[in-house]
Amino acid sequence: MDYVLQTFGLSKKYKKHLAVNNAAMTISRGDIYGFVGENGSGKTTIIRLITGLIFPDDGSFELFGISNKSSAIKNAQRKVGAVVESPSIYRNMSAYDNLKMQCMILGLPQDERINQVLRDVGLEYMLHDKKHAGNFSLGMRQRLGIAMCLLGEPEFIILDEPMNGLDPAGIVEIRELILKLNRERNITFLISSHILSELSLIATKYGFISNGHIIKEITASQLQEQLKKTTDITVDNPKALEQLLTTTFPQSKLSTIPNGVRIDGDIDINLVTSAIINADIRLTNISSHDSSLEDYYLEIIGGKRV
Amino acid sequence: MINLIKSDYKKFFHDKLFLVVCILAFMFAVTTPLLYLVVLKLAGEMDPVTEQMLAGYTNAKGQFFGAFSFGNNLGIIAPLLIGIILYKDFSYGTIRNKIICGHSRTSIFLSLFIVCTTTLFGTLLAHALLTLGVSLPFFEYQSTPFTTADFWYLLESLFFEFLVYLFAAALVSWLCVTMKNLGMVIVMYIAIFFGFSTIAGVFQMVAFIPNMNKQLLDVIDFIQRINVFNSSATIGLGTKYELKDICYYVITPLLYTSGILLHGIWKFNRKDLK
């Protein structure tokens, strides 16, 4: 397996607070890794550790197979682009000047790439605009931050809460940009986000973190298999319904809901409906739905809210 | 590191605060000689004490080297303002861009230091040259004719001034990478500056006390000489350097600068960044 990132027992302590505790995660080339955890769970600390902004107290990590303890890690870091927390931009410079600065830092020739990345993030209209980045909306700053990431043509992009401050149209654009870069340039992504519904639309793998510890890693397809389907049925006589379902569908898992019953797992709705009508029970509502990434997350962290 | 230096220069020259430094340098360069001219005209026949106080400024040479003095207008303000520009990399979080793309912390720190040194000394030199230019129509360069020895003395003095501002740039860069916020950078710079300046002032007065113990005077002289904040005020005021002067003016700032740089590199390589 071609790993972009592997962490081994990574730990970080701030005074007495253990922010990251023995974290182990793996990201393979081409993954869009959704990093999920409550506030203060250690997501940003792990991102800071792997971007070299802070140093681990214990454990290690490998970027593109190069250990953080090796001096060659700098070469691996050159393949990484990241927006950590808020985009790092010069507020007293225009979008173009910020990108020019980043080109200088990376030692890149300028104009062609700048035009390209501004187009990529939908900021092409800012090419000749002298407006200072400090006056940009949060959404524009996010896009500029991503544009700066893209300048160095990274193979691995880390985005910490990239949807923050974006309007619905902006969220869709960023999502599509991530998918496009992943599909066309095989760029690997690590994305931390609180908007789990958004993550579920793009992630190919998830890492769940709580109290600084990676509690579960799961691929999107494995998650799909584990997400439960439930069917809620409400009727005029819930007791009769429960009795009917227990006898007709003895293998189904039932639970009580107001004026009805919930069936966990796959079930043929047509069969259930026929059985109810034949038993002369008045059906008021029947609905079927899949549990979401949010439900799954809440379940594995023990019901704590994000 | 060349890429870092280029980007740091761009950051400097793009910052409006640097324009403020340049405007201040121009303003002080124009007004200072004219103010001395007015003071000297008003003073007329001076008593010996006043004459001694103004001795360094009654010629263009004194005003030229006075422009470099740490305690002079621009000498106080320029390192502070340049420090504020430097710190923007930390307050904007743009230092992260440099680290994430693989630049070593040592080269980031040294790049800041190099850019700080050149812009600081460059500004002070431009300020001093402009001061000289404004002074020359009103004051003679010195009371004696300008000789080759004076030329070498001028070059030596400029080199010593450069070493003083090398130390100032190291101090400012060190504060930027070790302090937690801009407020602390400013407070610490002012505290260090006034702390050392006050020490220099106090010892200057103590040295004037009559019948002072010779050994104590030697100790005071030594402390004054190793106080870089004080030495910038004495460079260029004579006509010739003795070997002892050269040792102090070269070794002291270089020792301080290397100590500060080494500590800065060590500290920055261990510092957690937001």
Image: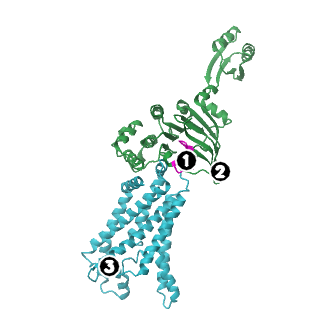
Chain colours: A green, B cyan
From this viewpoint, is residue B93 visible? no
Q: Which residues are magenta?
A: A62-73
Q: Nearer the viewer, residue A303 or B215?
A: B215
Q: Position of residue A219 (x, y in %)?
A: 59, 31
Residue type beneath disc 2: His
Residue type beneath disc 3: Val
SS for dot 3:
helix
Q: Position of residue A55 (x, y in %)?
A: 58, 51
Q: Is residue A277 magenta?
A: no
- Side of A93 where A283 appears, left or right: right
Q: Which chain does tag 2 point to?
A: A
CA distance for labels 1 and 2:
16 Å
- Count neighbours of disc 2 (C-alpha within 10 A) and say few if under 14, some if 14 to 19, many if 20 or more: few
Farthest-out residue, top? A278
Q: Which chain does tag 1 point to?
A: A
Q: Nearer the viewer, mark 1 or mark 2?
A: 1
Q: Position of residue B24 (x, y in %)?
A: 35, 65
Q: Which residue is mark 1?
A: A48
SS for dot 1:
helix
SS for dot 2:
strand
Q: Which residue is mark 2?
A: A17
Same chain letter for marks 1 and 3: no
Q: Position of residue B181 (x, y in %)?
A: 51, 57
Q: Which residue is mark 3?
A: B39
Residue positioned 53% across, 63% down in the render: B263
- Side of A191 where B74 appears, left or right: left
Task: Please tell me whether residue A178 is drawn above or below residue B137 in the rendered image.
Answer: above
Task: Please tell me whether residue A3 is drawn above or below residue B89 in the rendered image.
Answer: above
